[in-house]
Amino acid sequence: MPYLRKIISYLRPYKTWVLFALSLVVVESLSELVIPRMLQYVIDNGITPKVMTVILSGAGLMLFAALIGGIATVIRAIYSARFSQGMAYDLRNDLFNRIQTLSFGNLDRLQTGQLITRVSSDVDIVRMFSSLGFMMIVRAIVLMLGSLILLVITDPQLSLIMLALIPAIISIFYFLTKLARPLFKLIQERLDVLNTIVQENLAGVQVVKAFVRENEQIDQFDAANLAYKQRAIKVFRLMGSAFPVVLFVGNLGILAVILFGGVQVINARLSVGELVAFSNYLMTSTFPIVMLGMIVSLMPSAEASAERIFGILDIEPDIKEALNPIELLKLSGNVFYENVSFFYNGNSEQKVLRNIDLEIKTGQRVAVLGATGSGKTTLLSLIPRFYDVSEGKLLVDGHDVRHLSMHSLRAQIGFVMQQTTLFSGTIAENIAYGRPDASMQEIIKAAEAAQAHDFIMAMPEGYQSQVEARGANLSGGQKQRIAITRALLIDPAILILDDSTSSVDMETEFRIQEALDDLMEGRTTFIIAQRISSVLKADLIIILERGEIVARGSHAELIESCSIYQEIYRSQLRDDIPIKKIVTSNAKILQEGT
């Protein structure tokens, strides 16, 4: 089981506790092995000859051995919990840290439900095995070896019965383990599906209710839950069948011992005490077999979960830090696309961007227009290295972004995404997410610039108001303005606004644009917009179609020469006026447009 062997490396920091717990397991097992020998002594030297002092002393020694075993069991359980919980803590941290290092491309290929299952359920299964499984294996080995040795000492001929049972039982367990491992892996995959359905349902609860799809969601979850239940029943039916088989084989051994041992007692080759001790040792050696049955039920499940855990830990991030990254303390904001193409997952037949050549100088405002799926967001996601270019180069301040420190690059880029994400906490904490050390004065100044201050102050606790789950106590426009505030607070050299005013009304958009006019001065700004009114003042407007730049220029240039841009402008702003009549002067157009 290769993945469980890899899990052992996570126990190394706790090796002192592990070794101490294992030593206590040996003490438990030895105390258990001593009792049948004492029982033999009491029967042969106390009960049979009726010597009360021997009976009392023997009973006292057995009580002492049981007490030692009980204390060792309690202490071992405490230390087992310590190292197993410590290992689980480290595993969860490493999993979460690995997820943080994964690129957008890696995460695109993973479902949220899968990640949740691996961080929670899979880690817990591995923890249980490390706490119980390893201890049970050692206990079973000590009991079986000790019992065999004492069986041979007591009667070599009768011990052959046990030696014959062991290979048969091991064969049964090996066969069951081989069958169970892939089934346990399927159980966890079914759990992935369940978690994904729950996560998507909670994230999209408003859509579910708006389209009256509650019953369909219930049916979908019920189907996934049923598949999980059926798979689990199948696995545990298989594992449950192991115990009766093993106990039957063990009972056959005890029956054989009673039969042949009884004959030897009658023939005076064996004392009653020796037969009782032999039977006890045989049962003691059978008990580890039952424990091995429990281990068999844990081991395939733990191996399957360990495989899934390392399936995440072993992922190589698509985006990697350069060996000796360049730290840019202050970006100026020059951006240059040199024959850039991009495609997902190495599929060069389906390019999202094709042969992009584009140069943007410090302080320029660049607007990107295009239909849904034309590659607008992808084009700008290359700048902070959310994805890496597939072909060509992308330079920032003359440096290939792949050679720059990702932290120094992203820390100076303000990105307001299409889908606004707010975290649990106060509004002030959400605004200061990129700059936790920001003062309240700085937070308020950024909020005023993003036209967010007034509605924040109207809330019961102002900036200390709590954000409810998924920002339920905020409108879409309010969440967008908080996202803009968050981006402005870091004072970025490059500001990327990805359709950032789509959820606000025209009046609020106009006020935000007015406030941003001053804030854009001196910083390179990219604006993805559906409303053409948001881009009229841009220095450069780019029109994307199927991943290619089909037109570029200022508003005045495009309104004269680009039919696509003319159509967008006509449909949104001046549907009742012919294009030729509109083209008088850039200043007049800007005035009419705004």
Image (cartoon, grey):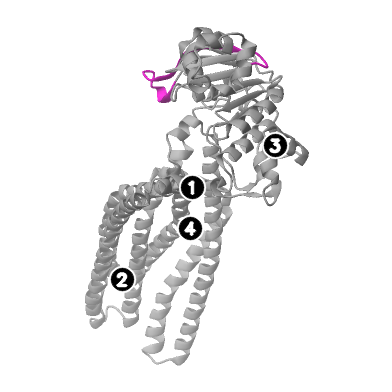
Hey, what amino acid is under mark 3? Answer: Ala
Q: Which residues are magenta?
A: 343-364
Label 1, label 3: how far apart the Cα atoms are: 36 Å
Residue position marked by numbered label 4 in the rendering = 131
The residue positioned 34% from the left and 64% from the top of the image is: 290
Which mark is first along the chain, 2 or 4?
A: 4
Q: Earlier in the sequence, mark 3 or mark 4?
A: 4
**What residue appears at the point 31 percent right and 50 percent down from the top-left corner?**
183
Residue 352 lies within the magenta run: yes
Report, in whole angstroms, how far the alpha carbon at label 3 lies from the one at label 4.
Answer: 51 Å
Give the crowd class for mark 2: few <14, some 14-19, many >=20 residues within 10 Å. Answer: some
Rendered view: 351 above or below 136: above
- Residue 40 lies, in percent from the top left, at 38, 79
Q: Which disc, if any, is residue 447?
A: 3
Q: Circle 2 sits on which residue? A: 155
- Kindly report which numbered mark, 4 or 1, lies closer to the viewer in this rendering: 1
Q: Nearer the viewer, residue 511 or 126?
A: 511
Whole-number angstrom distance, CA of label 4 to CA of label 2: 36 Å
Image x and y of residue 539, in percent? 62, 14
